[in-house]
Amino acid sequence: YLLSEAMAALGIATSRSLAMVTTGELVHREQSLPGGVLARVAKSHIRIGTMQFFAGNNDVEGMRLLADHIIDRHYPEARDAENPVLSMFRGIMSKQAKLVTSWQMVGFIHGVMNTDNMLLSGETIDYGPCAFMDIYDPGAVFSSIDHAGRYAYRNQPGITHWNLACLAQALAPLFSDTEEEAINIAKAALEEFPAYFLDANSAGLRSKVGLTTTEDDDDKLVKDFLDLLEANACDFTLAFRRLSE
């Protein structure tokens, strides 16, 4: 509840908490605990995993109906495109690039960035193991089960790209009726994601360090600053606050 409200106050796209209720049942994990439900609201709860469910069952018609619904609800501008599903996919990539960039800018680390925890509306979901980073450490992880650092702070953009590749794979039959062409379309579209992310990330970092113009050495300047934060174990948030003073 607190994390999602903080994200909303920071202007980051997020689901919100509606209500918390107890179930009257016990949940058995390391120990028995009282069960409860945290009801969340979002523009929709359609995830990459939702599309994968239909793809996994070879239900192309179900995917087509779901894609039509997603376009109508979240990406109406894609309806008039030459390839509406491809246009929708590009819109999803753009929203995810902006969302993960906004996480990076405030040091937010999502603990479980699997495909079932990425909303196609581009909002943050699943505030399980997660946190805002204190000392700047690109390898920081906030999930007790993430021993290999798959969802570390530095890996969030790459994991987003990987998740979007899973979505493209599921959507491929809707890109074209010809399998080879569908695969080529999916690959070409996915290659656009790094540019989406780098543009959003560069703009975000320039804003954080107070640059009002764009110069060729901006990225090096920001990288040098972040390297200093890491080398000196500086607090990520306070370092930028001090810089602003």
Image (cartoon, rainbow, N blue to C red):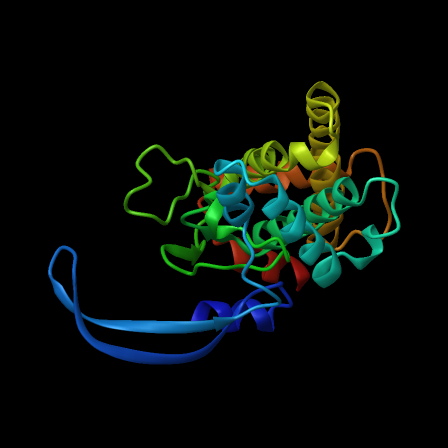
Q: Position of residue 105 (x, y in %)?
A: 61, 53
Q: Position of residue 227 (x, y in %)?
A: 56, 37
Quadrant location of the C terminus in the rendered image: bottom right
Q: Which residue reaches farthest left?
A: 31
Residue 28 in view of the camera = yes
Quarter-wise, where is residue 129 in the image? bottom left
| Left/right of residue 220 with respect to residue 142 in the rendered view | right
Please name the residue shown 73% across and 34% down the image: 175
Eyeballing the image, is 155 above or below 142?
A: above
Quarter-wise, where is residue 186 in the image? top right
Q: Where is residue 242 in the image (x, y as percent from the top left)?
A: 60, 60
Eyeballing the image, is 120 above or below 226?
A: below
Quarter-wise, where is residue 217 in the image? top right
Residue 1 in view of the camera = no
Quadrant location of the N terminus in the rendered image: bottom left
Eyeballing the image, is 22 above or below 215?
A: below
| Left/right of residue 245 with respect to residue 162 in the rendered view | right
Number of numbered labels in the structure image: 0
Q: Which of the two residues, 173 or 166, is positioned nearer the viewer here?
A: 173
| Left/right of residue 112 with respect to residue 108 in the rendered view | left
Please name the residue shown 67% across and 46% down the image: 64
Q: Which of the two residues, 6 or 36, is positioned nearer the viewer here?
A: 36
Q: Which of the two residues, 107 or 169, is positioned nearer the viewer here?
A: 169
Please name the residue shown 55% across and 35% down the image: 166
Please name the residue shown 74% across and 43% down the image: 85
Q: Which residue reaches farthest top?
A: 180
